[in-house]
């Protein structure tokens, strides 16, 4: 495998890891930031919507910018902006300043999210096999590392501003360090006339490769081949919204489920989210091999079906132990589904990869934010565990609609190669 592709993959891992670490540091220090700003939980909940709104705006902006200038430029810029913006919430002393800080932090995170996923698609295209899920797994690892580091800094009584400043400095330095390793716009393309696209080798019915590249039509910054988003991309985005809403339900309600429905002690209830998150991370490390063997279609169909079965078990579990098994199965099934949607969106049209990823990521992120808003009101009508059958239905819909990842039959790919720009190292 070409050393340029290997370097690009390492750089992408580093960026995903730091993004998870930066956002994890924010989550760990939310109570301290809330206290410094002098606000209550209710107001914080409303302000967090600005974080999500900023992220959505950043995703849409980064999609167009990635297609125009290439992720080689937008990834370092997004990483530097996201890392630097982390300092702002630590400086906030009242609600208005915290509102502005969260809007900027969300915008930076959204820019980085789409940029790094667009670059990940480019790297995957060069490798000619699924590697997207591993990047998302490393993001989760970054969050775990942030939880461990944040716990230690809190124990040492470091202020949030100091922790955020150190994290920001690391992010800015890393942004400069990874820039030479990021792929140039054409480095992930296969492309001579008549060659099969390397994405075709990503497993039977993978659906993650674009149409064969024709000489002279390769994606380059500033090149646009269409002015509208195809219906298939919106379908991928709708599935991402449903599956990420389901993921958000686990984030927000799994612990409360064990505590309020099954009367588990708080110390035990916390294991519900832990079991889900651990299964999600482990599953993502395993998904790429499964997708390479059976195709991304199979990952989405059977993963969503497994997630539906797991959440059904958790919802109807008569005991804490059975519920923990259910949340674990839910996480394992859900783990590889969303990365397949991101990958398919990016590969659908190399010239519009950034915009396509921004559509899928943007609606998916809105789905995750909508989880608390949707499940909460449902609990006024039905018990919490029965409200979980809404995300169960979404998982079933994703399993049924998994055929969106199927593409026409393609010839087996030749060994992928990177087209090196002059001066690449």
Image: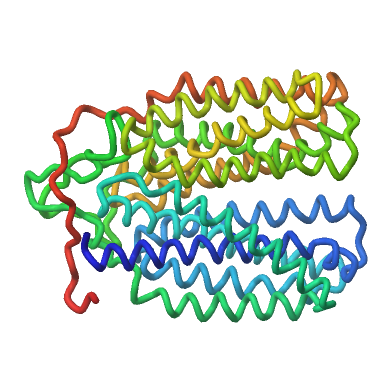
Residue drawn 29% across the image and 53% down it: 224
Q: Where residue 360 sits in the image (x, y, percent)?
A: 48, 42
Q: Based on the displayed image, in which of its 4 quarters is residue 177 positioned?
A: bottom left
Q: Based on the displayed image, in which of its 4 quarters is residue 311 positioned?
A: top right
Residue drawn 39% across the image and 70% down it: 73
Q: Quadrant of the C terminus?
A: bottom left
Task: Count the numbered circles shown.
Answer: 0
Taking depth in this image into account, of 395 and 55 the one nearest to the observer is 395
Q: Where residue 363 sits in the image (x, y, percent)?
A: 55, 41
> Looking at this rendering, what residue extends furthest in the front direction?
321
Q: Where residue 262 sits in the image (x, y, percent)?
A: 86, 27
Q: Where residue 24 sits in the image (x, y, percent)?
A: 67, 60
Whether 315 is drawn above or below 331: the answer is: above
On the rendered structure, is 187 left or right of 330? left
> Looking at this rendering, what residue extends furthest in the left direction?
194
Taking depth in this image into account, of 282 and 351 the one nearest to the observer is 282
Residue drawn 52% across the image and 36% down it: 240
């Amino acid at each position: 495998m070409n050393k340029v592709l290997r370097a690009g993959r390492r750089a992408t891992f580093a960026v995903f890891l730091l993004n998870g670490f930066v956002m994890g540091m924010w989550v760990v220090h939310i109570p301290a930031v809330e206290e410094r700003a002098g606000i209550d939980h209710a107001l914080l909940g409303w302000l967090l919507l600005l974080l999500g709104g900023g992220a959505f705006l950043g995703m849409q902006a980064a999609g167009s910018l990635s297609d125009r200038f290439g992720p080689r430029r937008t990834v370092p810029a997004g990483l530097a902006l996201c890392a630097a913006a982390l300092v702002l919430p630590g400086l906030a002393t009242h609600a208005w300043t915290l509102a502005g800080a969260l809007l900027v932090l969300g915008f930076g995170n959204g820019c980085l999210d789409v940029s790094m996923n667009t670059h990940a698609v480019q790297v995957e295209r060069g490798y000619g096999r699924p590697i997207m899920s591993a990047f998302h797994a490393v993001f989760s690892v970054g969050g775990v590392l942030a939880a461990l580091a944040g716990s230690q800094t809190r124990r040492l009584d470091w202020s949030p501003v100091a922790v955020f400043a150190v994290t920001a400095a690391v992010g800015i330095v890393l942004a400069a360090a990874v820039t030479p390793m990021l792929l140039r716009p054409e480095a992930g393309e296969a492309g001579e006339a008549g060659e099969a696209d390397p994405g075709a080798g990503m497993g039977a019915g993978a659906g993650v490769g674009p149409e064969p590249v024709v000489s002279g039509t390769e994606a380059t910054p500033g090149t646009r081949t269409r002015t509208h988003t195809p219906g298939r991309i919106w379908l991928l985005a709708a599935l991402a919204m449903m599956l990420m809403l389901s993921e958000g339900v686990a984030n927000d309600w799994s612990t409360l489920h064990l505590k309020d429905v099954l009367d588990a002690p708080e110390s035990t209830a916390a294991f519900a989210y832990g079991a889900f998150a651990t299964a999600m991370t482990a599953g993502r490390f395993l998904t790429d091999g499964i997708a390479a063997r059976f195709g991304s279609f199979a990952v989405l169909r059977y993963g969503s079906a497994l997630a539906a079965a797991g959440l059904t078990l958790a919802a109807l579990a008569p005991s804490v132990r059975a519920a923990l098994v259910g949340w674990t199965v839910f996480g394992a099934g859900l783990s590889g589904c969303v990365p397949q949607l991101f990958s398919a969106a990016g590969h659908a049209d190399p010239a519009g990869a950034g915009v396509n990823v921004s559509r899928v990521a943007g609606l998916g992120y809105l789905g995750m934010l909508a989880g608390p808003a949707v499940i909460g009101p449902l609990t006024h009508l039905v018990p919490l565990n029965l409200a979980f059958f809404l995300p169960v239905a979404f998982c079933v819909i994703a399993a049924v609609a998994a055929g969106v990842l199927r593409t026409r039959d393609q010839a087996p790919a030749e060994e992928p190669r990177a087209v090196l720009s002059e001066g690449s190292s």
